Amino acid sequence: MVVIGAGACGFAAALAASDGGADVLVLERDKRPWGSTGMSLGAVCGVDSAEQRSHGVTDSVAAFVDDVMAKTEGRADRALAAVIGHESGPAIDWLAAQHSVPLKLDLAWTGLGHSRPRLHVPPGRTGEELLVLLSQAAERAGVTVVTEALVTGLYADDSGRVTGVRIQRPDGRHEELGCQAVIFATCGFGGNHDMIAGHIPSMATARYFGHEGNRGDGIRWGQALGGAVDDMTAYQGLGTLADPQSVIVPHTLMIDGGVLINVRGERFTHELDNISGMCIPVLQQPDGRAWVLFDERLLKTSLVHSIELQQLQELGAIKSAPTLPALETLINVPSGSLTQVLAEVAASKSAAQPDAFGRSFVDLAPLTAPFCAIRVTGALFHTQGGLSVDSEARVLRADGSPLPNVFAGGGAARSISGPDVTGYLPAMGLCMAITLGRIAGRAAAKQVCSNTLTTV
Ligand SMILES: Cc1cc2nc3c(=O)[nH]c(=O)nc-3n(C[C@H](O)[C@H](O)[C@H](O)COP(=O)(O)OP(=O)(O)OC[C@H]3O[C@@H](n4cnc5c(N)ncnc54)[C@H](O)[C@@H]3O)c2cc1C
């Protein structure tokens, strides 16, 4: 059985397939696995996990599905959301218990669409660490990972059954490999600028901050085999990518009281309304840029657990000044503008009323001197549309029938974010990768092993 792509989805699929007794090979285009998983923050959403229960968090599939439907205004696939609700917690438990990939509940991340704490992180809180843990688990399980193996095409019969793959090696040689089943773990199409222009024209000129090798290959192969796609207009964006450093500014700075201002020194949005959708108002500001305004108290609290903030500090991206007028000069916004912004926030807090953008500051400590700011821009992180799959991660045709031996997960499959940027719930990218990857690997192994028995 062949898994194409060595990100979180590919590894989860390979581990599950190996658990199921399949002889599995992972093919990866890069010299070492990295993908969007390696670039990510490593937070994985899971529902009703052992970790949640050990912290006394009561979660349920129904609560998760309600959150997904609320976030997407009823436009996500409810049945798929229920599958993810049922399988995501057990997938996290399985990784920890059977494959020594520990993911701990992160209580710093609550709200933002999740009605319960659901984000699970590796000990070092990075996607790179998650990927290393997964690849070590695959090695222990005896999974073969072939790197520098760019899959350039598939061989299939008239029924859409894939019989082999064509691989291009770095020296230009081509190799062919037969297989009984294939799993597309090639992520989405963020690195395919023509596809972005076609499906998400509003982000055609925006920065793409995902893995450039994700060119939508699995999605296009699936379509060529007769598979259907859905929600191709959906994506996760981010309004707070440090500019020009391209490091993610942790949202906890805003959750704990920070605000966004534009280059005119004006606020322009509710900073917590929609993390993913925030890329749009930020890109609409003059120059497509903004500043995250916070204070040294928040900096100290967040620095302890945010590697990104530590990087930003090392890179000199955090501008700091003892007073608001000094910060206004430092970041070149009009004199008096920041004083005005914080006066409006203070007025909203003392009146116990939401501000003009609908945000409440009632429970938040006011920002105090010294003050800090980081310049940010909006970016496209990863696409959310992809191949339609069923509860076994089998790729479906438009009539709902499955392709014979083709599975997809992670960014290659349609997610549960609805059709646009605002439907993305935090940590769903890795959740779809690990959960659907595991489902795909398990189902494909079952199919392959029963085929083998029949042949014998
Ligand atoms: C900066 C950033 C931060 C993020 N943070 C989070 C987070 O904290 N939580 C979360 O849930 N999500 C996060 N995401 C999203 C998350 O990273 C992705 O949703 C997830 O990694 C997708 O996993 P995947 O396995 O499908 O894809 P990937 O990890 O991208 O793996 C796909 C692999 O397929 C390979 N490949 C592609 N085409 C071919 C081919 N033709 N032949 C061979 N190999 C091929 C690629 O090289 C790549 O290694 C973040 C994304 C970004 C960009």
Image: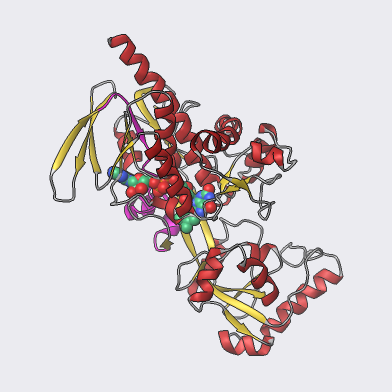
The image quadrant that residue 153 belongs to is: top left
> Compared with residue 400, is residue 387 higher up or lower down, i.e. above or below?
below
Q: Magenta span covers which residues?
A: 179-206
The quarter of the rendered structure image containing the N terminus is top left
Can residue 286 be seen?
A: no
Residue at the outermost right position: 351
Q: Which colour scheme is used?
A: secondary structure
Name the residue nearer the viewer: 236 or 373: 373
The residue located at (81%, 63%) in the rendering is 363
Q: Pinpoint residue 58: horizontal percent, then vertical percent.
A: 74, 37
Residue at the outermost front position: 140
Can residue 273 be seen?
A: yes
The residue located at (45%, 41%) in the rendering is 410
The image quadrant that residue 451 belongs to is: top left
The quarter of the rendered structure image containing the C terminus is top left
Q: Pinpoint residue 398: horizontal percent, then vertical percent.
A: 41, 28
> Compared with residue 136, is residue 363 higher up or lower down, i.e. above or below?
below
